[in-house]
């Protein structure tokens, strides 16, 4: 990930773009929103538990995670959202 491996404090808007299947493992907190822009049929796996509160916007592709991966707030799904709740 181009964000490195640390936590991200998001009090505005964070845009994550993925070309090709990939993983986003950073923990995101704060009052901002997160927008995932995924190319075509590609998949982004969100593996962290996040606490941001500004909502989630999915634009294209597939975004996978569990219920804790997408913070709180509204989810706008203009792609495919896949919740994998294994625990």
Image (cartoon, rainbow, N blue to C red):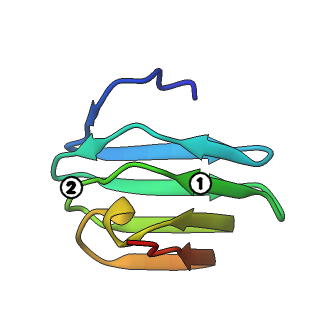
Instruction: Identify residue for label 1.
Output: 45
- For residue 47, side relative to residue 27 (left or right): right
Measured as percent of width and height from the top left, residue 41 is found at 83, 65
Q: Nearer the viewer, residue 43 or 66?
A: 66
State the image quarter where residue 81 is shown: bottom right
Q: As displayed, is residue 26 above or below residue 82?
A: above
- For residue 24, side relative to residue 53 (left or right): right
Residue drawn at x 56%, y 24% as measured from the top left? 2
Q: As displayed, is residue 42 above or below residue 77?
A: above
**Label 2 Cα crowd, 10 Å radius (few <14 / some 14-19 / many 20+):** some
Q: Determine the residue located farthest toward the front in the rendered image.
A: 87
Residue drawn at x 36%, y 64% as measured from the top left? 70
Mark 1: secondary structure: strand
Sequence-first tag of 2 and 1: 1
Residue drawn at x 60%, y 44% as measured from the top left? 23
Q: Which part of the image, by quadrant, shows the C terminus?
A: bottom left
Number of marks in the rendered image: 2
Measured as percent of width and height from the top left, residue 16 is found at 53, 44
Residue drawn at x 46%, y 40% as measured from the top left? 25
Residue 73's tag is none
Q: As displayed, is residue 24 above or below residue 5?
A: below
Q: Which part of the image, by quadrant, shows the N terminus?
A: top right
State the image quarter where residue 7 is shown: top left
Contact, mark 2 vs mark 1 (Cβ under 8 Å):
no
Instruction: Identify residue for label 2.
Output: 51
**Label 1 Cα crowd, 10 Å radius (few <14 / some 14-19 / many 20+):** some
* Structural distance between the alpha carbons of marks 2 and 1: 17 Å
Q: As displayed, is residue 70 above or below residue 37?
A: below
Mark 2: secondary structure: loop
Measured as percent of width and height from the top left, residue 80 is found at 65, 77
Measured as percent of width and height from the top left, residue 76 is found at 46, 78
């Amino acid at each position: 990930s181009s964000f490195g491996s640390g936590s991200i404090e998001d009090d505005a808007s964070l845009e994550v773009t993925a070309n090709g299947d990939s993983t986003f493992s950073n923990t995101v907190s704060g009052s901002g929103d997160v927008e995932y822009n995924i190319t075509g049929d590609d998949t982004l796996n969100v593996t962290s538990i996040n606490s941001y509160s500004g909502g989630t916007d999915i634009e294209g592709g597939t975004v996978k995670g569990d219920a804790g991966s997408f913070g709180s707030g509204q989810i706008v799904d203009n792609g495919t959202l896949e919740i994998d709740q294994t625990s």
